[in-house]
């Protein structure tokens, strides 16, 4: 009872605007996040939760904040690319300082990119810079990247929040892990504090080179339970909330104090299987699972109003468009065929009666629900699946070690390389299925080096058709819409397709009234 009282008291203090460290008259924006980031250091960030926040602390050479497909100048005011696509030269701004007052120069760019490429740092973004041979600081405000081969997605990699530029000093002095808890960037907001499971606080950078932020402080609060997220935005404890249940979104849309904004997203959820560990490694097991679950009905019931059924890894509107082929290749709900496959595996000794195994997933409520639905269906065939819903810091090492059966998601920019390479290439740390095939690697490598959408598109169609329509290494579930619910006191905020929080950009400057 005492613990409950303290929890309610803390919630009440936020609801009444009595946030710790907030002075009267300050413009403070309170944002609910469904999961606490694992990292804030761009070199170490492993997923969308860190990316969503880091873009406010760090700047990149170029920006995709206003357009997910067209780069805009940021720390680099201009750039040139040689005709063979192997040399990129960036001309840097001269009026930028880090939050600690140090001037931003080419040495910081060189340091950051080399830190990403350094195997010792185990950066999740290392794969995106594999084609880079070396980085040269030509002078204090000119940087040239020399590539081994032409690499079409390089600008997207440089514009990602995971390529935010670090200050060479102090990052090199304290090390990547220590820097992660005290990040220093050039962004619109400066890091103040990180209290695990409670809040991450940023304050405005009054010397930001684009403009002076209207907000004095931004407080990001981890709220993993969607029903609590809804209650907080309804009561005024939050100014912006996301990743809520459809029934709560419908109710909140009727509240005249709130704005509900929904846009097509660039995020998915999927089932993944190990390509190495039995019985998951047998394609018959994967096809049996596909046939055993009425996915159309399950997805419609769980993601109603906030997503559409996915048949591929590449969303509609992102080339190469192959939805029609992939939809025809999807397996239907067929309990008889599922049983036949499971019986074959049992007869051959690859699957034991009463086989027990975990289905690993995050604490995302939608993924927990679909995992529960899958586990329920599999019990009909004598399989005892249990749902293991874990926070990201615990889940990530399990997935990297080969978990067997998992439900995860991905979100990225509208280029097929970012939707496929990190998930299906044998050299990627995010290839949780350990799906390692030379022909897949070859196609993904070609997709990076070929010039022209048609030629590149052929490679990605091959990867998707092979991985999802013949090997069934994943079962695509849903492409999620992005819905943000905002207090009407918030002005200038727009949700992003990646579910990021872009508070200050070249065209917007979020504020509260």
Image (cartoon, rainbow, N blue to C red):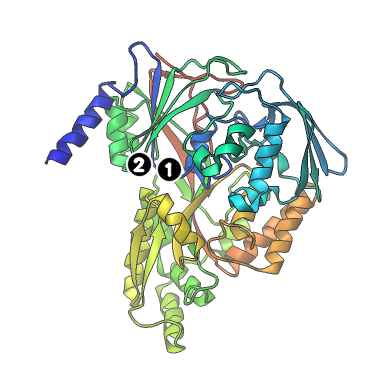
* Label 2: how many Cα within 10 Å (few below 14, some 14–19, many 20+): some
| Residue at 51%, 68% in the rendered image | 274
Where residue 173 appears, as percent x and y from the top left, is 58, 37
| Figure check: 104 above or below 398 | above
Q: Which residue is mark 2?
A: 246
| Residue at 60%, 69% in the rendered image | 470
Where residue 476 appears, as percent x and y from the top left, is 51, 57
Where residue 246 appears, as percent x and y from the top left, is 35, 41
Decide if residue 333 is on the left or right side of residue 421. Answer: left
Q: CA distance from mark 1 to mark 2?
A: 7 Å
Where residue 443 appears, as percent x and y from the top left, is 72, 60
* Label 1: how many Cα within 10 Å (few below 14, some 14–19, many 20+): many
From the viewer's side, name the closer residue of 371 and 400: 400
Quadrant assignment for the C terminus: top left
Quadrant assignment for the N terminus: top left
| Figure check: 323 above or below 203 | below
Residue extending furthest toward the front:
173
- Whether pointer 1 and pointer 2 mark residues with C-beta atoms closer than 8 Å, the reply is yes
Q: Which mark is residue 70?
A: none
Decide if residue 464 is on the left or right side of residue 482. Answer: right
| Figure check: 268 above or below 252 | below
Q: Which mark is residue 306?
A: 1
Would residue 321 be visible to someone looking at this image?
Answer: no
Would residue 384 be visible to someone looking at this image?
Answer: yes
| Residue at 40%, 23% in the rendered image | 29
Q: Secondary structure at mark 2?
A: helix
Q: Secondary structure at mark 1?
A: loop
Residue extending furthest toward the right:
83
Which of the marked residues, 1 or 2, is nearer the chain's N terminus? 2
């Amino acid at each position: 009872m005492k613990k409950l009282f303290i929890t309610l008291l803390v919630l009440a203090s936020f609801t009444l605007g009595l946030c710790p460290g907030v002075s009267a008259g300050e413009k403070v924006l309170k944002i609910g996040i469904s999961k606490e980031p694992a990292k804030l250091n761009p070199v170490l960030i492993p997923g969308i939760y860190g990316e969503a926040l880091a873009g406010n602390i760090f700047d990149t050479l170029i920006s995709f904040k206003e357009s997910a497909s067209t780069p805009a100048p940021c720390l680099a005011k201009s750039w040139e690319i040689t005709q063979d696509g192997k040399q990129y030269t960036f001309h840097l701004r001269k009026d930028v300082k880090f939050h600690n007052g140090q001037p931003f120069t080419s040495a910081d760019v060189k340091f950051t990119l080399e830190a990403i490429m350094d195997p010792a740092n185990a950066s999740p973004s290392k794969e995106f810079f594999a084609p880079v041979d070396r980085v040269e600081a030509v002078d204090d405000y000119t940087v040239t990247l020399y590539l081994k081969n032409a690499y079409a997605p390089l600008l997207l990699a440089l514009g990602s929040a995971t390529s935010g530029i670090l200050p060479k000093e102090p990052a090199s002095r304290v090390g990547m892990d220590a820097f992660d808890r005290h990040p220093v960037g050039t962004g619109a907001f400066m890091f103040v504090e990180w209290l695990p499971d409670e809040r991450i606080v940023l304050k405005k950078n009054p010397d930001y080179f684009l403009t002076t932020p209207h907000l004095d402080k931004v407080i990001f609060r981890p709220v993993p339970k969607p029903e609590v997220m809804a209650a907080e935005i309804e009561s005024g404890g939050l100014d912006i909330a996301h990743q809520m249940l459809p029934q709560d979104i419908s109710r909140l849309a009727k509240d005249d104090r709130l704005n509900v904004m929904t846009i097509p997203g660039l995020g998915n959820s999927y089932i993944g299987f190990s390509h190495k560990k039995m019985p998951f490694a047998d394609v018959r097991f994967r096809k049996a699972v596909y046939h055993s679950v009425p996915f159309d009905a399950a997805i419609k019931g769980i993601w109603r109003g906030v997503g559409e059924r996915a048949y591929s890894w590449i969303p509609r509107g992102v080339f190469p468009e192959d939805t029609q082929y992939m939809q025809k290749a999807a397996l239907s709900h067929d309990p008889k065929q599922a049983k036949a496959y499971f019986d074959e595996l049992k007869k051959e000794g690859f699957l034991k009666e009463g086989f027990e195994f975990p289905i690993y997933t995050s604490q995302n409520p939608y993924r927990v629900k679909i995992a529960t639905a899958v586990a329920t269906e599999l019990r009909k065939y004598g399989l005892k699946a249990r749902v293991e819903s874990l926070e990201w810091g615990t889940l990530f090492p399990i997935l990297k070690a080969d978990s067997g059966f998992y439900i995860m998601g991905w979100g990225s920019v509208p280029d097929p390389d970012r939707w496929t390479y990190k998930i299906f290439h044998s050299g990627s740390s995010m290839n949780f299925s350990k799906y390692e095939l030379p022909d897949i690697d070859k196609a993904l490598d070609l997709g990076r080096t070929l010039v022209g959408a048609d030629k590149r598109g052929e490679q990605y169609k091959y990867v998707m058709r092979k991985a999802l329509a013949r090997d069934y290494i994943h079962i695509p579930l849903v492409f999620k819409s992005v819905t943000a619910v905002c207090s009407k006191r918030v002005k200038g905020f727009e949700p992003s397709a990646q579910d990021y929080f872009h508070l200050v950009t070249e065209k917007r400057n979020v504020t509260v009234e």
